[in-house]
Image: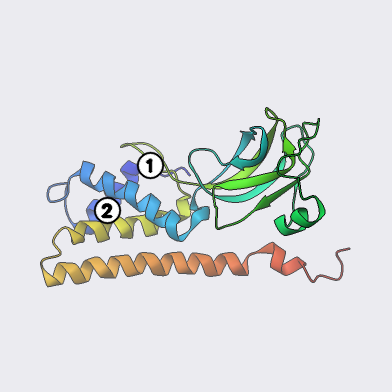
Amino acid sequence: MATTTTSILSKVAILLQDDYTRWSEVELLDWLNDGQREITLHKPNACIKQAPVVLIAGARQTLPADGVMMNRVLRNSNGSTVTLVSQQLLDLQVPDWYTTQKSTNQVKHYCYSPYEPTVFYVYPASVGGNSVVVNYFALPANVTLGAVINIDDIYVPALINYIAFRAYSKDMEYAEQASVAQNYYQLMIAQLSSKSTGETVGNVNTHTKNDPSIP
């Protein structure tokens, strides 16, 4: 993430053939911020963060305030790894695991459900105060003129197309403008879909999971 808002808006101005007259720079910046969030709606990993999460007492924990979805718990902050386990398995084998706290600051396992995307559970239940390092998908914060965007630079073309979509949507009462706006939106969606395809092809896990050379 090194591209600035000024750089993006200057490209948008060229695309719109407008020198911030019909569409002001402040207006375009608002749409840029909306575009960051729109892109993460389709591609949550456009804004991914890693941060320590200080645990509260108990098993149920939450992501940082800007978190929208868990990726994974990596490790205890002091270094030891944490593994993902089935919540159903814990329920069967340790029925009281939600409330039984251990006199340790080590988390061994965690559970997660996408139906509760900002919540995860740790085992053993924390006594409070210890922390784990978490990878999570974040909601991009608003950026100001001249600041660096909060999503990966690879999404800049899609972001430009989203801003153009919003700009032409300003005159949606004209059929021609409405058509142009929708074309820019569909182009953004196509770019994000291409990114998803590339991620699938380039996923090292799918390449190695059946590799007989790996023990």
Q: Residue furthest left?
A: 174
Q: Residue furthest front?
A: 96
- Residue 130: where, in percent of width, then height? 70, 30
Between 215 and 136, which is closer to the camera in this rendering? Answer: 136
Q: Residue at x 11, y 66 (%)?
A: 173
Relative placement, left or right, of 63 versus 179 is: right
Q: Residue furthest top?
A: 129
Q: Residue at x 39, y 67 (%)?
A: 189
Q: Which amino acid does the dot numbered 2 rest on?
A: Val
Residue that numbered label 1 is attached to: 4
- How many residues crowd around disc 1 within 10 Å: few (fewer than 14), some, or many (20 or more)? some
Q: Disc 1 on helix, strand or loop?
A: loop
- Residue 90: where, in percent of width, then height? 76, 53
Quadrant location of residue 88? Answer: bottom right
Q: Residue at x 82, y 54 (%)?
A: 93
- How many residues crowd around disc 2 within 10 Å: few (fewer than 14), some, or many (20 or more)? many
Q: Residue at x 33, y 36 (%)?
A: 146
Residue that numbered label 2 is attached to: 12
> Which mark, residue 107?
none
- Residue 6: where, in percent of width, then height? 31, 42
Residue 118, compared with residue 78, is above or below; it is below
Residue 49, compared with residue 156, is above or below; it is above
- Residue 112: where, in percent of width, then height? 64, 53
Q: Disc 2 on helix, strand or loop?
A: helix
Quadrant location of residue 208? Answer: bottom right
